[in-house]
Every structure is written in C-alpha cells, then in structure tokens.
Image (cartoon, rainbow, N blue to C red):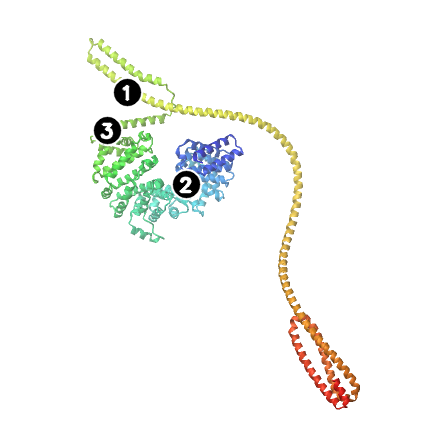
Amino acid sequence: MDMTTSLKSLLLAVQEYREGRTAQNTAQLQKQVEEVSRLKCDQLLSSGQLLPGDCVSGLVELAGNQNTSPTLTSSIISLLAQLACDDAGWEILHSSYNLTSTLASVIHYHSATPGEPLVLQCLQVLQKLTYNTQVFPSTNYIHELLTFLMTNIQSENDDVIMPCLGLMVNLCRDNHSVQSHIKSLDNVKPFYRTLINFLAHNSLTVVVFTLSILASLTLNEKVGQKLFDGKNIYQTFQLVFNIIVNGDGTLTRKYSVDLLVDLLKNPKIADYLVRYEHFSACASKVLGVLQSKDPDSAAKMLELLLAMCSVSGLRSLLCEVVFRPAGPKLRAAGRRQGAEADGGIALVQWLSSPVEGAESCSLQALQLLNELLEEALGAETLSDSVLSFVEMLLPVLLELLEGLDLARGDAHLRKHCHRITHVIGLLLILCAEDSTRSLVSRQVSAQLCLSQVETLLSCCHSNSPLTCLPPSSDNDLSQVCAEALLRTLELMSKLRQQVKDMETSFYRTLQDQKIVTPLSLALTSHHRERVQTGLSLLFEATPLPDFPSLILGQSIAANNAYRQREAELSVKRVAVQEVPPSSILDSSSGPSRSVHGLAEKIQNGLEEHSKTSHVSEIIDVYEQKLSAFASKESGLQDLLEAKALALSQADRLIAQYRFQRAQAEAEACKLGSLLKEAERRREDLQVELSNQVLEVERSKADMEVLLQHNARLQQDSAKHQDLKGAYNALLSRFNESERLLKEVQTSHTSLAKQNDALKKNYEALQQNQEKVTSVLAEREEEVRSLTSDLKQKSSDITGLRGELRSKEEKVKAKDQEKRDLEDTVDVLRKELNKTEQARKDANIKASSLELQKSQLETKLKQKEEELNKNSAMISMIHSLSSGKLKSDVNLSL
C-alpha cells in the first residue's frame, strides 16, 4: 500500500472515530496508525500537501481529547514523532499544528500518574519539539506544564526527573516570559535548593541540565553570581569541556554545548574563559572531536567554536590553536594520552561534506574559517602556518564551487547557492591581503568565474515564476541566487588585475541585461552589505557603453513599488470588499473624458478670446492646467493599477471565502444530521435507560442471591484451601514414595540379575554333584562287596575258632590284627558317611573326595596285602598241624 492510499484510509478512520467512539472504530484507527507508522515518511510534513496536513490535524485533535484511550494516544504521538524526521518537521508541528499545547494538555490530564508510559512519552517528544524553539506564554496549558515539571523535579522518581529537567531547560532558554513566571511562583526557593542539590548527582546529564536551568534563571541574580563566580566557574568550564570531549551520550554533549554558548553571552563569564589557563588545550580537544563522522556532534562543535569567535579575546586564541604548526601542537599534546589531529584539517574535511548530507556542517565550517582567517589576516604579521593552511584550503574551496545541477530541483539549488556565497565570501577575505591574494589568483581562473556567473544568471532568469517575481523574504530563491552572483562578481572585480582574461569577462558580464535583476535586488535590499556591493558594482558598470541603466531603473522602481504595496497590505490588513469591474472601468474612463472635455473648452476659449486677450498668456495658463491634469491622470492610473491589484486579491479572498463557506455549509449539514442522529440516539438511550433501571432493580435482587452464593463459595473456598493443603502433603508423600519405588525397582533389577547368575551356578554344581554321586555309588557297591567278603571271611574264622581255641594264644596277635582291620572298616564307614555329607558341598570338596578316594584305594591295597600276608602266616601256622587239617585249611584259605 502506497503512502497516499494509507493517508486516505487514516483520514477516513479519524472521521469515523470522531462520529462514533466505538470499539470497532478505535481498533480500525489503531490499525491505520500502525500501518502508516511502518511506511517511510521522510519530509512528508514539509511537502505542503493537503492530505498529510488534514491527517495530522485530525490526529493532533484526537491526541488532545481527554476521552481518547491512552493506548491510541500513545500510538498517535509515536506516529507524529516519526513524521517529524527533521528540524523542519518539528517546527511545522510546533507552529502550524500547536502540538506543544496538545502534549501539555495530555500531561495535565495524567498529572496524577507521572510515571505512566504515556506521560514519559509526551515528555520525551516535548523535549525534542521545544529544542531551540520559542514557546510563548499564551500557549495553552503552558503554566500547568511548568507547575508539573517543577513538582516532579522535586520528587524522588528518577525516571521522571531526567525528562522533566531536559524539558525545563528548553522552556527556560532565551525565554524571559517563562523565566519570569517561574520566578513569580511561591515554591521557587525550594526549587532552587533542589537544583543545587542536583549538582552533586552521579549522572553528568542531570548536572548539565541543572546548570543550564540555573544559568537561565539565576545568572543575573545573587544566586547565579554565587554559583558562577570566579571560584566555581573554572570547575564548570572543566566539567563542560570534559563532557564535550569525552562525551556522555549525544544528548549530554549537545546540552553541554548549549550551556557554554549561553554562558559566553555574559561578558563577565566570557572574560573568565579568556583568562582560563587550559583554554588552548580544551580548544584543541574540541577540534579533535571534529574527526568523528557524526554530523550532529560536529555541528554542535562548530556552533561552539562560532560562539567563541564572537568573543574577541577567544578569537585570537582559536587562531593560534587552529593555525599553529603541527610540531608544537604535538609537543603540547604529549601530556595527554594521544595527540589530537590537526584542527584545520578537520575543518577542511567538513568543508567537503556532501550538500545533501551534512550541509549545515559545511556552512558552519565556512563561517568559522571566515572569522578565523579574518582575524589572522588582520594581525600585524602573517605567519607561514597561515599561508600553508591557505594553500591547502584553496583547492577544496574551488572544488566546492562545482557540482551545481539544475535538474535536482530548487532545494538543491538553494543549498548550493548558500554554499557558493560563503565560499566566495571566504575568498574575498583572502583577497584583502597581498600575500593571500596572490595565492588565490594562482588557483582561480576567469573561466571558472565566468561559468559560475552564467549558471547563476540562468537561475535568476529561469522559467520558474518564483524566481522572476520580486522576493518577499531573504530566503527566496531569487534573492539567494542574486547574492551568490553579486559575490562572484565582487571576486572578479578584486582579481581582474591579477588573473588573465578576468577583466574582460567582468566587464562583459556587467553589460549583460540579465545582470539587472540581481543588481536591482541588491540595491533595494534592506541589508547594508548587499546595498554596498550593488553600489560598488554599479559604480564599475555605469561608465560602460552598453550597461542597461534604463532597464535597471525600471526594475528598481518596480521592486520599490512592490515593497511599498507589501508594506501597506501588511500594515492595514483590512478586509477588501468586492468591487464591480464596471465601476473600475467607469473610474478609469472618467479622467480621459474630463481631459478631452477640457481640451475642447480650451480650444473654444482660444477662439473666443483670440481677439480680446493675449494668446500667449492664455496658452501658458492652460498649459499649466494641462500639466496638472496630466499629473493627476498618472496618479489616477497608478491608483487604477493598485485597485486592479486589490481587485485580484479581493477575488482570491472571495474565492477562499466561498470555499470556506461551502465547507462550513457542508459542515453545518453534517452537524445537523449528527444532531438529528444524536436526538434519535437520545430517545433510544432514554428507552434503554428505563430498561436499565428495571435491570438494576433485578440486578439488586440477583446481587443478594449472589452475595449469599458468594458466602457459600467462600466457605467452599476455605474447605478447598484445607483440601489443597492435604492434597499438597499427600502429593509430597506420593512423590517420596515414587522416588523410593524407583530405587527399590533398581535394586530389584540388580538382584534379579544376581539370582539368574546364581541359578546358572547352581545348575552347574548340581550336574557336578550328580556325577560325584554316581561315582560314590559305584564306590559304595565295591565297598559292600568287600564287606560281604569280609563277613564271609569272619564266619569262616569263627568256625575255625572252635578248632583253633587251643591255638588262641598263638593267634592272639592275628586276632588283634583282625580287630584292627575291623576298626579300619569302621573308619572307612565313617569316611563314607563323611563323603555323604560332603556331597552337599560338592563344588568345594570334589577335589578332596578324589584325593580321599585315591588314598582309600591305596589303603585298601595295603590292607589286601596285609590280609594276604596274614593268610600266608595262617597257612604257615596250619601247615604245622596235620595234613588233613592242612589241606582243609588251604582249601579254606
């Protein structure tokens, strides 16, 4: 969406919101304001278009309405601040739309809540709006605003104190009416004490604001004389210079410069600064700030330096700082952290800044160089450093004379002509001294000056009607071009003897008829310097043969007549009534008819009195009368022209009146319809009011029921709180149990893994046990077979006992051995029982069982060997008996 469409939608939304402040209209207007805020609004206010003006008027009106919501008011103020993107925009909002009064009314409506964002926003916008702007005491709500500022400056809210101090600085600066009003208030002394306490504040911005307010209010009083006396002023100088050089934000630096400029207006303080011993070092540091690329900071530094040049004692000191050689400067800067850059080079760099960007800095640098070079060239001796600086400066100045493009519009042409005027003025100052004039003559050529003159002449005589008419102010394009042209011609006059072909070009230009317009403007100007320049050029041009002196006289007369008519109109300011064209025609034809009648009477008189009187005397009398009537006729002709001009102005005023009357009638019709609509709405609202009364009665009954229900709900709420506490306790216990459960589950998982491992080990051990059990069973079977054999042998021995009783004594030893063998068998049985017990611990005693088994086998073999030996012994014993017995014994064995 383009800008025009958005503005039309915004204007429609404003009108709908005026007609009905409904929620839908409010939301629609808020939406349109936000949409316009997202668009690029550069120089929209200064364009002079009707649509933006209507939108801004409507928005300012809504912002100042007390019934507008704070949110919508804040959005409108943000949009207005965005539209004022430059100084011209702020000036238009202040002078044309009275935004200062509107914001003051908003602050007054919300004065009970100074910390509200809307109030802070209004204070910030007002601080920008009133900077370097005169606020008249007749402005609405200005006294309430001052009371609000003084009250909140004495409060303890730091968020409000800072913007209130900044706004108070703007209102008090160079405004005697505001200062007088503040001094007449009853609480001015506590206000002074609060400001003096602020001088010890931690924020340098607060300190600078406080010093500025005190300087505006008390500089010429006893309080100010004590604050800014010889003991304190040097500390103030040091503080301000430190802030300017080191910087505590762009805002603080800007107000510090303004404070020092205001202090320099006092002759006593200016004299203190002249005697300030560190002034040269501080000035060098100020020139060092010009090395920054910030146009705003550079503009404030140049403004400060220009203010210093207004003091004669400081101007010579600044010349020493700017034009001194680099060597001493670097030695003087050795005491600091680093040497500042050459101040003259910094000024030259800002000279070459583009016209569309930092043109104000460029013009300020030219003005400063004008002051400094005029001071330096006026000295008794001209130093070599100044000559070297001029040699470096001249190519830059000549480069500034180029770059004029007529196709870029009147704004670019006006800026470029201003710059040409200042550059030529600086060159004229350089031409005042012989040594510097020779330097200028080497760089400036006749072709350069002639091209500049031709371009400016074409500008003065362009097809634009604005440049052809006589100017009404010094800022008109024709006046600006004429001044630049005359300065160029003055430079050509200064250099016509030193530059080749310069004299020829100069005299040829003076004989051009185009020179009449700028020369007549200069001669009829109210500026002394322009008149003197025009007279000097006229003195040079009058002896020339082709100089258009007659056309110049006519142009001067036209300019004077125009100025006289403008003065009469500005003084009288009376309403011009409509004059019929026929009356003017009659009044113009009347004198001609009277003249013709008078001529006929003279002729008849001559015929009648030709015989009775002297004809020559009669002719002389009537010639005098004719000349008198001719002068009256010329006066009447001038009056006719004035009446024609008044008629054209009256026609224009009538057209404006008819247009305004049509608008008023349309507005009246609209107001009538709105009145009817309001009456209809009033009737509807009356019916609705009666319904609302019934609703109120019903609502009272419902309210009692609701109060009872509310009491029950409060009891339920108390129970709910108790249950909520119990629930929170149970919830904490549940969380603790859940935590313990997680820990138990973790330990259960680890134990389950250990159980699985033990089961696997148990199965392995069980298999080993089964193997050992089978082996032991086999061994038991063998032991049982051996036991049965032993029993059989015991029975045989028992049967033989009867036979061998006689031989018991002989075989006691053998019986003893037998008993030993039985003991051994018992031991073996015990070992078998132990083996049964050891099966339960098979994985530990398996190896020991194998060892015991092998030992048992060894012992069994030994016992068998012993039994064999005993059997052999028994057989040998029985062999001693009878043969039968021997054979039986052998068989038994």
Along the line of sight, which residue is nearer the eye, 436 or 21?
21
> Label 3: which residue?
549
> Label 1: which residue?
634
- Local secondary structure at mark 3: helix
How dense is the environment of label 1, judged by Cα within 10 Å: few (below 14), some, or many (20 and up)? few
Q: Which mark is residue 218?
A: 2
Q: Quadrant of the C terminus?
A: bottom right
User: Residue 619: horizontal and vertical position, in percent?
Assistant: 21, 14
Q: Choose the circle earlier in sequence order: 3 or 1.
A: 3
- Residue at 29% across, 20% down: 635
Residues tagged 3 and 1 counted as in contact (Cβ below 8 A)? no
How dense is the environment of label 2, judged by Cα within 10 Å: few (below 14), some, or many (20 and up)? some
- Local secondary structure at mark 2: helix
**What separation in Å lies between label 3 and label 2 (alpha carbons)?**
58 Å
The image quadrant of residue 792 is bottom right
| Vertical comparison of 15 with 345: above or below | above
Q: Nearer the viewer, mark 3 or mark 1?
A: 3
**What separation in Å lies between label 2 and label 1 (alpha carbons)?**
62 Å
Residues tagged 3 and 2 counted as in contact (Cβ below 8 A)? no
Q: Amino acid at mark 3?
A: Ser
**What separation in Å lies between label 3 and label 1 (alpha carbons)?**
23 Å
Along the line of sight, which residue is nearer the eye, 695 or 864?
864
Specify whether 392 is left or right of 108.
left
Specify whether 838 is left or right of 607.
right
Q: Amino acid at mark 2?
A: Thr
Q: Amino acid at mark 1?
A: Ser
| Vertical comparison of 153 with 803: above or below | above
User: Residue 63: horizontal and vertical position, in percent?
Assistant: 48, 34
Q: Nearer the viewer, mark 2 or mark 1?
A: 1
